[in-house]
């Protein structure tokens, strides 16, 4: 429920009260003595979704934008007379006026926004280098990225260009700053006692997750954008949703900066692609949901401009997402192929050493199997070198495994060759096999 307070301009009292009577809304009126251009203050309760249509009728009755309108959210309203209003104005979304106010509140002052974003990036960068998921999530609580994302969509839907422009500028400028800050931190920490010498950041799990983006990343971003829009429209859970949006943006931005610091431009590029895809997906999902929820400009003549802006921006965002999704599709395919090849290699070697020829002679597969088949690495190189005609080059499957055998047993000279042939048939790929042997001892009882 909402409590609306409206200052009535001189000469408009009867027309305003007539609207409220027609809507069967209970109200209270006080004479206004503070300023000459207003003659009364009217206050009335109404469900959140009813604020917008009632205010539209009140504007027609003479309540201009120069008049003060205050919308309050009371803790509790007790009255059986409200049931009729709740049935008439059924729905869960807030009014356009509240939406604008919340969008403006969520986008803090520019200096505050950049200060919190820098602090979030510093914490997230430390979490990435420490491979600490808890630290990264903690950094996201600080990141103020939900406000600009929501502001950009709200401004577009209600034809508030200044609000939309500010949201876009804060998002783009903030993420570029995050990449720069992470790169500077990486350059300062690289080679110091704080990090192991010759550290390969690609071996850090939290960083590796951000350098292999796939379609699951796109779903995360779309879900975050929808959750952000719903939380604003329904007025619940905005803090937690802000964390989800920040998780989709700040860690990959910090990863991109670290890639620049280490001179690993493939890492910087793929993490940057992930940032851009997530940014576009969050904005397009929020934009579409706000429009489908019925939010429109207050002025009827501005609705057409807003519709054109929503359609054009949605089309641009969708096209950009589709183009970048080619990268996601290739990485997803590469990851699937890698997992499939590893599974095929392990299964075939286990079958091979369970056969009587090897099992009866005491040969065992130690379980230490190394499969080096990472088409994603080739993919990164192709992206950097801009060779779209070769989406995924063929790469030999490098297999290394260790075989244990009893002392005194003769090692067959052709294990590597046989394994090579079997694995080539099982995987359908070129294979290079390296076999190590260890003498196994076993006690008997």
Image (cartoon, rainbow, N blue to C red):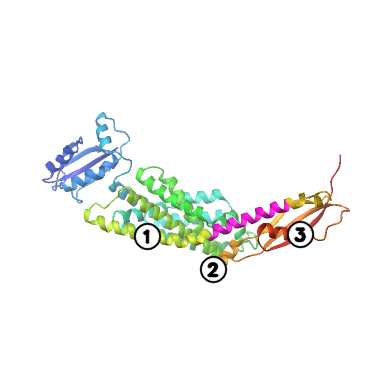
What residue is pinned by disc 2?
384
Q: Position of residue 330 (x, y in %)?
A: 54, 61
Tell me if I can see residue 302 in this picture: yes
Q: Is residue 441 left or right of residue 431?
A: right
Q: Label 2: how many residues lie within 10 Å, few (<14), some (14-19) or many (20+)?
A: some
Toward the right, the furthest residue is 408
Q: Considering the numbered disc 3 on the image, is that residue within a helix, a strand or a loop?
A: helix
Give the numbered dot on residue 315.
1
Which range of residues does the magenta coloring cover?
A: 330-350
Q: Quadrant of the N terminus?
A: top left
Per the image, the residue denoted by label 3 is 418
Residue depth check, mark 1 versus mark 3: number of the one nearer the observer: 3
Q: Residues within 10 Å of mark 3 (few under 14, many from 20)?
A: few
> Can residue 263 be seen by looking at this rendering?
no
Taking the image as shown, residue 362 lies to the left or right of residue 64, namely right
| Vertical position of residue 79 compared to residue 382: above or below | above
Residue 339 at x, y percent in the picture: 62, 54
Residue 345, image quadrant: bottom right
Question: Does the magenta run of residues contain 381?
Answer: no
Q: Does label 3 or label 2 sit earlier along the sequence?
A: 2
Magenta highlight on residue 349: yes
**Is the residue marked by circle 1 packed among few (<14), some (14-19), or many (20+) residues within 10 Å?**
few
Above or below, 50 against 210 in this view is above
**Residue for point 73% across, 53% down:** 349
Q: Secondary structure at mark 1?
A: helix
């Amino acid at each position: 429920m909402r409590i609306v307070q409206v200052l009535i301009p001189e000469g408009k009292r009867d027309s305003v009260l007539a609207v409220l009577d027609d809507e069967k809304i209970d109200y209270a009126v006080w004479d206004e003595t503070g300023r000459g251009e207003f003659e009364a203050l009217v206050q009335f309760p109404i469900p959140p979704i009813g604020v917008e249509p009632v205010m539209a009728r009140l504007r027609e009755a003479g309540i201009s934008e120069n008049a003060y309108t205050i919308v309050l959210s009371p803790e509790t309203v007790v009255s059986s007379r409200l049931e009729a209003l709740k049935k008439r104005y059924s729905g869960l979304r807030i009014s356009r006026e509240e939406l604008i106010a919340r969008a403006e509140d969520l986008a803090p002052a520019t200096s505050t926004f950049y200060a919190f974003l820098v602090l979030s990036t510093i914490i997230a960068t430390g979490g990435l280098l420490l491979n600490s998921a808890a630290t990264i999530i903690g950094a996201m609580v600080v990141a103020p990225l939900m406000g600009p994302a929501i502001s950009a969509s709200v401004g577009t839907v209600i034809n508030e260009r200044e609000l939309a422009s500010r949201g876009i500028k804060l998002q783009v400028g903030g993420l570029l700053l995050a990449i720069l800050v992470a790169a500077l931190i990486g350059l300062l920490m690289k080679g110091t006692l704080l990090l192991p010498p010759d550290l390969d950041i690609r071996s850090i799990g939290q960083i590796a997750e951000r350098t292999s983006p796939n379609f699951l990343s796109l779903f995360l971003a779309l879900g975050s954008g929808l959750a952000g829009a719903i939380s604003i429209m329904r007025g619940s859970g905005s803090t937690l949703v802000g964390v989800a949006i920040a998780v989709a943006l700040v860690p990959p931005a910090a990863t991109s900066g670290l890639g620049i610091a280490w001179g690993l431009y493939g890492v910087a590029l793929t993490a940057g692609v992930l940032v851009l895809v997530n940014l576009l997906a969050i904005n397009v999902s929020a934009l579409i949901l706000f429009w489908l929820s019925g939010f429109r400009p207050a002025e009827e003549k501005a609705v057409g401009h807003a519709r054109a802006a929503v359609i054009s921006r949605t089309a641009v965002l969708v096209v950009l997402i589709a183009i970048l999704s080619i990268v996601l599709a290739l990485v997803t395919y590469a990851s699937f192929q890698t997992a499939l090849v590893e599974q095929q290699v392990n299964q075939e070697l286990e079958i091979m050493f369970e056969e009587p020829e090897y099992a009866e002679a005491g040969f065992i597969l130690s379980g230490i199997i190394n499969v080096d088949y990472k088409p994603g690495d080739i993919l990164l190189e192709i992206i950097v070198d801009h060779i779209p005609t070769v989406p995924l080059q063929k790469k030999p499957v490098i297999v290394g495994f260790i075989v244990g055998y009893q002392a005194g047993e003769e090692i067959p000279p052709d294990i590597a060759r046989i394994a090579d042939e079997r694995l080539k048939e099982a995987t359908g790929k070129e294979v290079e096999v390296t076999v190590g042997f260890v003498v196994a001892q076993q006690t008997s009882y």
